[in-house]
Amino acid sequence: MDTKELYPGYGEDVRLTRVAPAPRQIVHQELEYFGFIHFTVNTFTGREWGNGEESPSIFNPEKLDAGQWVETAVRGGMTGLILTCKHHDGFCLWPSAYTEHSIKNSPYKGGKGDIVRELSDACREAGLKFGVYLSPWDRNQETYGTGKPYDDYYVNQLTELLTNYGEVFTVWLDGACGEGQNGKKQVYDWERYYEVVRRLQPEANIFGCGPDVRWCGNEAGDTRPSEWSVVAAELADAEKVASESQQEDSEEFRQKKLVSTDMDLGSRAVLKNKKNLIWYPAEVDVSIRPGWFYHEEENDKVRSFENLKEIYLKSVGGNCTLLLNIPPDTDGLIREEDRRSLFMLGDFIRESFGRNLAEEAVLTVKPEKDRDGKDGSVLLKKGEETWFGNPDGLCELEVEFTWAEERCLNYLVVQEAIRFSQRVEQFEVYCLDGQGCWKQIEKGTTVGYKRIVPLHGAPTKGLKLVITDARVAPVLAFTGVY
């Protein structure tokens, strides 16, 4: 049979599903939720963007405890931490050999401190991943804006971070720059930066002005209802990413949400005329406070547990990774206000998704066997490298759970086997009502790595997931009911 005859548009769907993640991108997605540590001289000046003229003498967090940061992250449910090793002010949290504007000239530990070392060691001891943020924009470095001399400086510092502190899971390349039209213009050698990362830390993903992980487009925790990881290659253009990043320090930018024109990045209609496609999954970066750095006046403005829960469910549960910022104070500690909200989120994650009621149900899958002859029981095996995939051209799939007694259900979790690309276009969710009839309670579009569907505590003896449309054929990795 001519493959174009399987259904209208099949040939184009085949093209879209040829785009799949690299192994390192799958690993990154599986981490789901990790923390950001914004910490530098700004913590002591009260600024969000330093000017590069701050004296290292002001930096002295006398009670700093990287173990407390890590303990906070673990109890909060995080899988890793990313440190602002150098923010826009150029001050380095490690004793870089290439600048005097660093921790080595601060009072902290008599100039012998190295916070990158302290945190990377603490993460490793606790089993957390460690990542680095190294701001391309540098307001202190005199070579900034001169082209290759600054690129050499940046690469030297990047090399220090990627060779002296063990395994790094992500390198965060921020596109922010507030120089303005008449300021210094540095044409970054992005490809050179990428080569250094690939050579020194081949398993690390490059975020933002990089090819591996995409900025979600806002800092307010806003998400798209349909998040596609298969998008046009032009979205990874580093200069384009930088131009759309923050150009001035403003709370308005930090609170700005997505607009309608940003919503659809990967539908069939949008990608139809895009020749070059890539796998470029989204990351939601948001701070637990209004600012990215600690400010005493924001102690009563910490995000509530309810707000963090909503962000978690819509980001991790909406085919994104979540990067939540938890800034230490001037003592070098994460405040109790922040920890309380974070611990409640961690407890919620553990308690809500610890017991899979699907394992206690009678499972019925249609079709009964997948294209390789496997039955639906593979959908209950979380974390195992297995999947249930329909034959090509069969775009509908039903997964039904029934129990002898009523269960109060809060969430349905669905995951695609993204090694085979992202395929699900539309799905519906039904529950059995008191008369034994199936009643639709939810519907949605994309699934991707993970979709968390709220079920609102509905008491029922049955739940059914119906995938009504997919590209080529759905390939699911996991279904869970909680």
Image (tube, rainbow, N blue to C red):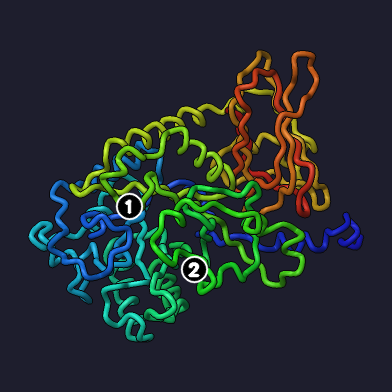
Q: Is residue 421 visible?
A: no
Mark 2, residue position: 210
Q: Residues within 10 Å of mark 1 (few under 14, many from 20)?
A: many
Closer to the camera in the image, 151 or 46: 46
Picture quadrant where residue 273 is located = bottom right
The answer to whether the residue labelled 2 contacts the one labelled 1, judged by CB atoms less than 8 Å apart, is no
Closer to the camera in the image, 139 or 436: 139
Q: Is residue 223 visible?
A: yes
Mark 1, residue position: 37
Closer to the camera in the image, 2 or 251: 251
**Callout 2 amino acid:** Gly
In the rendered image, the residue lying farthest to the left is: 110
The tag earlier along the polypeptide, 2 or 1, is 1
**Callout 1 amino acid:** Ile
Place of residue 334 in the rendered image (x, y in percent of width and height, measured from the top left): 27, 43
Closer to the camera in the image, 93 or 128: 93
Label 1 element class: strand
Image height of 330 relative to 261, above or below: above
Which quarter of the image is occupied by the C terminus?
top right
Image height of 92 relative to 37, above or below: below
Q: Residue at x 61, y 62 (%)?
A: 279
Q: CA distance from mark 2 to mark 1?
A: 20 Å
Q: Residues within 10 Å of mark 2 (few under 14, many from 20)?
A: many
Place of residue 209 in the rendered image (x, y in percent of width and height, measured from the top left): 48, 68
In the picture, measured across the screen, residue 74 lies left or right of residue 214, that is left
